[in-house]
Image: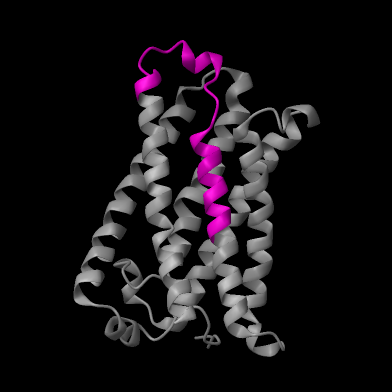
Amino acid sequence: MVSLPPGTIRNYNLQLQNESPFMFTILNLTNTITNLLLGAVAMNAFVYANLLSSPKSLIVSQHIYLCVFGYIILMVQAIHSVNINTGWARAFSCNNKRAVHYILQIIGSILGITGCLRMILTKGPHQNFSNFHSIFGYIAMIFTILSLIGGVVNLYSTKISINNKFIRIAHAILGSLTIVFAFLSMASFPITEEISKKKHLGNTNHNLFIALTIISLILILASPIMNVRRMLA
């Protein structure tokens, strides 16, 4: 097993000692609710993608699947992997958690960037900034690349003469900004003419999707905010 340098993840037992039982319970509950909402958001997006049946909409469907798997599923779980309140992550040691974090982040980033490029290269330059969905998505892709670079720097932070705590905080902030703009892009996606004609996907479902996405985003940010707070303590 590869031994990885200590970084973002502190000793699990030490974190438990520093967390009050009440706060630990609240964060566990928050994490569970977050995952339930993420499942609803992802399924809603997949249903939307599956309703696109015209040949021209194939690229949009691919874009949705790649970005949802990349950002909503894998990259969010990368954040959860370093959260002591994540049930599945408790089975891993600190070094293994760190390895899982980077694996999820790399795969999720590749899928997310591929999904963004799929649309950027298909549309003309004038259409890439035609609405908030495109703008937020473009910013999310840039932050994804920066977050990947930050992850590599964080991995080798013990070998370079830069403040280790500063690198970890910068990595957490970049990752959080990536998720923020990815979720904002998804919440502001435009309804295509093909979907608008389908009565079973009306304004009510659209508004519900936006609400679930924004609530999920707020709950997701609780984990990196708590981690940064611990680093600064």
Q: Is residue 108 above or below residue 208?
A: below
Q: Estimate the x, y position of residue 147 in percent, counting from the top left.
A: 63, 63
Q: Estimate the x, y position of residue 13 in percent, counting from the top left.
A: 31, 86
Which span is picked out in magenta?
176-204
User: In the picture, residue 206 is in which quadrant?
Assistant: top left
Query: At x 31% / y 69%, what residue is drawn?
Result: 85
In the rendered structure, the answer to whether residue 219 lies left or right of residue 171 reads left
Can residue 184 be found in the magenta stretch? yes
In the rendered structure, the answer to whether residue 59 lies left or right of residue 189 reads right
Q: Estimate the x, y position of residue 159 in percent, counting from the top left.
A: 69, 89
Give the number of callouts.
0
- Res 69 seen here: yes
Q: Estimate the x, y position of residue 129 in percent, counting from the top left.
A: 71, 32
Closer to the camera in the image, 184 or 195? 184
In the rendered view, how is the structure colored?
one colour
Q: Is residue 33 above or below residue 166?
A: above
Can residue 108 be found in the magenta stretch? no
State which quarter of the image contains the C terminus.
Answer: bottom left
Query: At x 49% / y 69%, what residue is drawn?
Result: 101
Q: Provide the major secondary structure of the magenta segment.
A: helix
Closer to the camera in the image, 23 or 108? 23
Query: At x 62% / y 41%, what residue is drawn?
Result: 136
